[in-house]
Amino acid sequence: FLPFDDDNTATLYQLIQDGRYSIPEKLSRESAHFIQGLLQVNPKHRLTIEELFSHPWLCQNDRPPIWPDEAFEDVKNNDIDMDVIQQMAVHFGTSLSEIHPLVVSRSAQ
Protein backbone atom coordinates (compact mmCIF):
# COMPACT_ATOMS: atom_id res chain seq x y z
CA PHE A 1 0.00 0.00 0.00
CA LEU A 2 1.41 3.35 -1.06
CA PRO A 3 -0.66 6.27 0.15
CA PHE A 4 0.49 8.48 -2.71
CA ASP A 5 0.64 7.05 -6.20
CA ASP A 6 0.63 8.46 -9.71
CA ASP A 7 2.58 7.74 -12.87
CA ASN A 8 3.22 11.44 -13.36
CA THR A 9 5.89 12.74 -10.98
CA ALA A 10 4.51 16.28 -10.88
CA THR A 11 1.05 14.95 -10.01
CA LEU A 12 2.54 12.65 -7.39
CA TYR A 13 4.35 15.56 -5.73
CA GLN A 14 1.14 17.60 -5.78
CA LEU A 15 -0.76 14.76 -4.10
CA ILE A 16 1.91 14.64 -1.39
CA GLN A 17 1.88 18.41 -0.88
CA ASP A 18 -1.92 18.47 -0.70
CA GLY A 19 -2.10 15.43 1.54
CA ARG A 20 -4.51 13.68 -0.83
CA TYR A 21 -4.42 9.93 -0.36
CA SER A 22 -6.72 7.04 0.31
CA ILE A 23 -6.56 4.47 3.07
CA PRO A 24 -7.79 0.98 2.23
CA GLU A 25 -10.98 0.03 4.04
CA LYS A 26 -9.41 -3.23 5.20
CA LEU A 27 -7.07 -1.37 7.59
CA SER A 28 -8.09 -1.14 11.23
CA ARG A 29 -9.34 2.15 12.61
CA GLU A 30 -6.21 2.43 14.77
CA SER A 31 -3.82 1.85 11.87
CA ALA A 32 -5.73 4.35 9.70
CA HIS A 33 -5.51 6.94 12.49
CA PHE A 34 -1.78 6.23 12.82
CA ILE A 35 -1.21 6.74 9.07
CA GLN A 36 -3.33 9.90 9.04
CA GLY A 37 -1.33 11.26 11.97
CA LEU A 38 1.93 10.67 10.13
CA LEU A 39 0.78 12.09 6.80
CA GLN A 40 -0.61 15.39 8.06
CA VAL A 41 0.50 18.17 5.73
CA ASN A 42 0.73 20.69 8.54
CA PRO A 43 3.56 19.61 10.87
CA LYS A 44 1.72 21.16 13.84
CA HIS A 45 -1.05 18.60 13.35
CA ARG A 46 1.22 15.55 12.93
CA LEU A 47 1.66 13.03 15.69
CA THR A 48 4.40 14.08 18.09
CA ILE A 49 7.14 11.58 18.81
CA GLU A 50 5.50 10.86 22.17
CA GLU A 51 2.11 10.30 20.51
CA LEU A 52 3.74 8.12 17.87
CA PHE A 53 5.48 5.82 20.33
CA SER A 54 2.41 5.52 22.58
CA HIS A 55 -0.16 5.20 19.79
CA PRO A 56 -2.75 2.46 20.42
CA TRP A 57 -1.90 0.79 17.12
CA LEU A 58 1.73 0.31 18.20
CA CYS A 59 0.76 -0.74 21.72
CA GLN A 60 -2.07 -3.14 20.86
CA ASN A 61 -2.27 -6.70 22.15
CA ASP A 62 -0.23 -5.81 25.22
CA ARG A 63 2.89 -5.40 23.14
CA PRO A 64 5.37 -3.11 24.82
CA PRO A 65 5.60 0.26 23.11
CA ILE A 66 8.61 1.08 21.02
CA TRP A 67 10.73 3.75 22.67
CA PRO A 68 13.04 6.20 20.91
CA ASP A 69 16.06 4.93 22.85
CA GLU A 70 15.69 1.57 21.13
CA ALA A 71 15.60 3.27 17.74
CA PHE A 72 19.09 4.68 18.37
CA GLU A 73 20.64 1.40 19.49
CA ASP A 74 22.55 0.89 16.21
CA VAL A 75 23.90 4.42 16.38
CA LYS A 76 24.98 3.89 19.98
CA ASN A 77 26.94 0.92 18.72
CA ASN A 78 28.79 3.21 16.28
CA ASP A 79 26.95 1.80 13.28
CA ILE A 80 26.68 5.21 11.60
CA ASP A 81 26.09 5.27 7.86
CA MET A 82 28.42 7.99 6.57
CA ASP A 83 26.46 8.27 3.31
CA VAL A 84 23.42 9.32 5.35
CA ILE A 85 25.52 11.81 7.33
CA GLN A 86 26.82 13.26 4.06
CA GLN A 87 23.28 13.64 2.72
CA MET A 88 22.25 15.35 5.97
CA ALA A 89 25.15 17.78 5.60
CA VAL A 90 24.10 18.62 2.05
CA HIS A 91 20.44 18.97 3.08
CA PHE A 92 21.24 21.30 5.99
CA GLY A 93 23.89 23.24 4.05
CA THR A 94 26.72 22.37 6.39
CA SER A 95 29.87 20.30 6.31
CA LEU A 96 30.34 16.67 7.19
CA SER A 97 32.78 17.69 9.92
CA GLU A 98 30.11 19.90 11.52
CA ILE A 99 27.17 17.50 11.38
CA HIS A 100 28.94 14.24 12.26
CA PRO A 101 29.68 15.25 15.89
CA LEU A 102 26.05 16.30 16.32
CA VAL A 103 24.81 12.89 15.25
CA VAL A 104 27.39 11.08 17.36
CA SER A 105 26.58 13.19 20.44
CA ARG A 106 22.85 12.53 19.97
CA SER A 107 23.49 8.82 19.73
CA ALA A 108 25.41 8.83 23.00
CA GLN A 109 22.44 10.21 24.96
Image: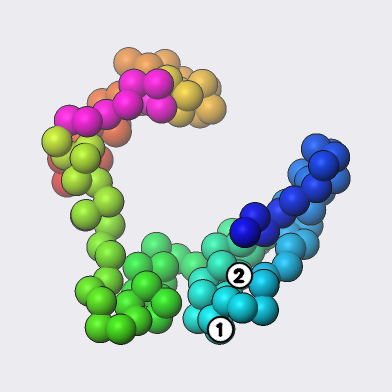
Tag 1 residue: 29
x and y, in percent, of residue 85 in the image: 38, 25
Left or right position of 76 against 93:
left
**Quarter of the view holding residue 53:** bottom left
Hey, which quadrant is residue 80 in on the image? top left
Mark 1 and mark 2: span between their CA atoms?
10 Å
Count of numbered circles on the image: 2
Q: Can residue 44 be seen in this view?
A: no
Q: What element carries label 2?
A: helix
The answer to whether 4 appears left or right of 31 in the picture is right
- Magenta stretch contains residue 79: yes
Residue name at image x 17 percent, y 30 percent = 78
- Are the two marked residues, 1 and 2, in contact with CB atoms closer than 8 angstroms? no
Residue 76 location (% of width, % of height): 16, 39
Q: Which mark is residue 36?
A: 2
Q: Reading the chain from its start, which is encountered first: label 1 or label 2?
A: 1
Mark 1: which secondary structure? helix
Q: What stretch is highlighted in magenta?
A: 78-85
Kind of residue at disc 1: Arg
Along the line of sight, which residue is nearer the eye, 78 or 106?
A: 78
